Amino acid sequence: MFLSIVSERLPKHWIRQTVALAVCATLVCLSVMDQARAEAKDVRISKGYGILYLPLIVMEQQKLLEKHAAAAGLGPVQVNWVTLDGGNVINDAMLAGMLDIAGIGAPGFITLWSKARGIAASEVIGLSGLSATSLYLNTNNPKIKSLKDFGPTDKIALPGIKTSLSAVVLQMLVAHEFGRENFNKLDPITVGLSHPDGLIALTGGKTEITAHFTSPPFSYLELKDPKITRVVNSVDVIGNITLDVVFAAKRFVDANPQMIKAFLAAQEEANELIASKPELAADIFVQSSKVKVSTEEVLSILKDKDTRFSTTPDKVMDFADFMALAGSIKTKPKDWKELFIPQLHSRSGS
């Protein structure tokens, strides 16, 4: 009755426009729902060891991606997490189609981005920044006080030689100490070990390993041993920059826009939890850690001025510039935006 009275009083072209708008809105909603239904229901994500991966660890424990995927209309999704260490291992898994999304050291991502550029089946794209902290080069050799003291019989443990985060940062430190042309001077004495294994080897003192270039909590735990000393802190040389990022197969990103949006929202919520509830974040890390570490020790790391978590990349191009000059990548991005998804381009990244 009401509608008939109103329709009699309103101009017919108003009614036609209103009906048309309603139909369009309905079609848009149905289209979005169809797109959401067409997106992946299973997502495979890798994370690594250490504090640098805390946002991803929180996302897994709190099921944040599942939460935001449901809110985006994607329905129930299966999120499969795997722990991988070292840029080479992660990149191989991505190229083999075993991963959709991965946390990785920025150099490892840049290496694969450059290698796969222009190859549609293999191309990757950055989703976000992840974390920054200080990397320590620790030693059990009392004669080593600086990078100049390492000899041919010493062995430096790090995950993934040449392309892992630790490997490239070590090259940057060596270039600062010995000159850019000598950036790879210590490469011959590096040994590929996961951070947990590197910790055991260094503190055990029964292997060839005399040094370990690592991130928290491993760096902190090693220094609790009176036989271990720190040779260098990365922040003192290259500054506090984004060390780890999140990237994905570009074909996955293109096919799953709502899932990518949900992932970023989940990561932002994880960062907020770490900032507002550090005790809870520390407990979550302790539960997931492969080494024995206390909540108090993790809290001290989270309170360190050099430890921070942000989805905005900061000075990632420092890595790209160095790697291009060193010849470890053939294709250099023209800027940071070329490395990351358009959703980040309005931010003050670098």
Image (spheres, grey):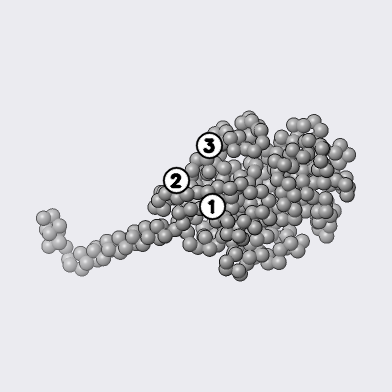
Kind of residue sitting beneath label 2: Lys
In three-dimensional space, the C-alpha distance between marks 2 and 1, rounded to whole angstroms, equals 16 Å
Q: Name the residue under label 3.
A: 276
In three-dimensional space, the C-alpha distance between marks 3 and 1, rounded to whole angstroms, equals 28 Å
Where disc 1 sits, the SS reads strand
How packed is label 1: few (under 14 Cα within 10 Å), some, or many (20 or more)?
some
Query: x%, y% of residue 169?
Result: 74, 51
Q: Mark 2 points at which residue?
A: 67
Residue 231 shows up from this direction? no
Kind of residue sitting beneath label 1: Arg
Residue 59 shows up from this direction? yes
Where disc 2 sits, the SS reads helix
261 or 115, which is in the foreground?
115
Residue, x 68% and y 55% (percent of image)?
88
How packed is label 3: few (under 14 Cα within 10 Å), some, or many (20 or more)?
few
Q: Which of marks 3 and 1 is in front?
A: 1
Q: Which mark is residue 44?
A: 1
Sequence order check, earlier mark of 2 and 3: 2
Residue, x 70% and y 41% (percent of image)?
196
63 or 236, which is in the foreground?
63
Query: x%, y% of residue 172?
Result: 76, 53
* Residue 188 placement, left or right of 240: right
Picture quadrant of residue 87 = bottom right
Q: Nearer the viewer, mark 2 or mark 1?
A: 1
Q: Can you say which quadrant of the picture contains the C terminus?
A: bottom right
Where disc 3 sits, the SS reads helix
47 or 174, which is in the foreground?
47
265 or 248, which is in the foreground?
248
For residue 20, above or below residue 73 = below
Residue, x 70% and y 43% (percent of image)?
195
* Residue 166 placement, left or right of 189: left
